[in-house]
Amino acid sequence: MSPELLSLRVEDDSEVVFLRRVSTLKLIVRNESGRVLRRICLAPPPLYREREEVKGRYGGLQLLWGGGYDKGALVTLPGDRIEVRPGEEGVVYFLLYPELSSPRVVNVPLDVLIEGRLVKRFTVKVRVLGRGLMSYVYRSRYVPRIRKELLNTVKKAVEEYGVPEVESKVWALGTPRPRVEVLLEGKRVVLITGDVGSGFMHISKIHVLTDLYIARALDPEKRERYYWVVRTWFFWLNKSVFDEAPDAERVEVWVNPDTEMVDWLVTDAHWKEVVYRGPVECAWVRIEGGEHRSFVSKLVGLLKSYHPPRVRNMRLYAVSPDSRDPRSAAIAISPG
């Protein structure tokens, strides 16, 4: 197989991550061959795959992905297309979570499979940095560039307010009606109910991680200000006939430090960033089963759990372009 079959590059500073923060690794894959390539998949080599959960592990660095394909992350394009034409580029999104004790560089080998056949191996050098002020700079999921111009805003916010405490409480897993509450300085800012980890529709375990960032944006009255952004990740990593695994969903609330109200909520819907408008004291989100258009998919939907978040008490405000188009900026709210 020609070494020019594919090329790969890292986009948007995404090889730089921070200790104990979930970050996007954004990779652009280009078809350098003269033919159409189908079902391109990037995956951790067998030596780096977890046995009990669908993810990769490189020492203390976890590599995660969504989409329900347990072999690895597929190169897909808008319209769910999995064919990459000659000269065309596609995007692969991974999520990185460093559970390391100190900063370092981690080599992350990734196998490239085409229609299930191993054709190449790339290695990405991931730089893991410590938890300084830069780690609080907001990074978009699909455009994870480190916006250094926000550093002065972060410094001012921390000097004025300190770093508020964030906490996620997972209630009553193992019962038919579980819920997750996310707290900022002890005040509940989002309640997440529905299919979040137990009951008939979803019996496998979930992982919940919550991070705090600082961003600038217009408030609902079009006045520019800075926000506490509380981002909560849900990860479904256990294989189950009842479940789409692996899968990852985020729910992030943008809290006005002066009013303590949730002005904005950002989540995702089929590779697009979706923004809801407040203000509300506490956002209410339900994670529900996906839409099924045929009888067969409806039947599967009774057993298999998908995880799109639905916001109940805020108004839809904006939807980004499809993040699988490498030419688009999949941002629905400007973070700076």
Image (cartoon, rainbow, N blue to C red):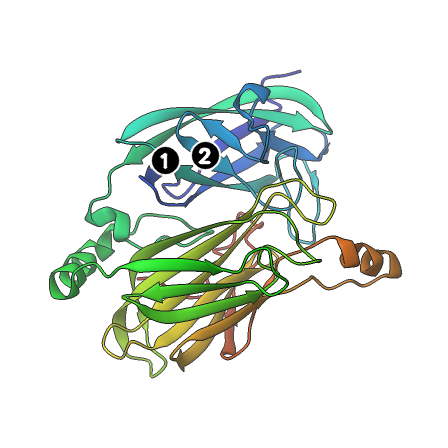
Circles 1, 2 touching at the beta carbon (< 8 Å) = yes
Residue at x-position 52% and y-position 30%: 56
Distance between the alpha carbons at the discs numbered 1 and 2: 8 Å
| Residue 33 visible (yes or no) | no
Q: Which residue is mark 2?
A: 62
- Disc 2 is placed on an element classified as strand
| Residue 241 visible (yes or no) | yes
Q: 217 left or right of 56?
A: left
Residue 214, percent across and down?
Answer: 28, 60
Q: 210 left or right of 304?
A: left
- Disc 1 is placed on an element classified as loop
Image mark count: 2
Residue 240, percent across and down?
Answer: 70, 43
Which amino acid, mark 1?
Glu
Numbered label attached to residue 99? 1
Residue at x-position 20% and y-position 54%: 151
Relative to the observer, which residue lies in front, 32 or 203? 203
Residue 57, percent across and down?
Answer: 48, 29
Relative to the observer, which residue lies in front, 199 or 227? 199
Q: Is residue 29 above or below residue 158?
A: above
Residue furthest right as drawn? 295
Quadrant for the C terminus in the image: bottom left
Residue at x-position 16% and y-position 65%: 161
Residue 84, percent across and down?
Answer: 67, 38
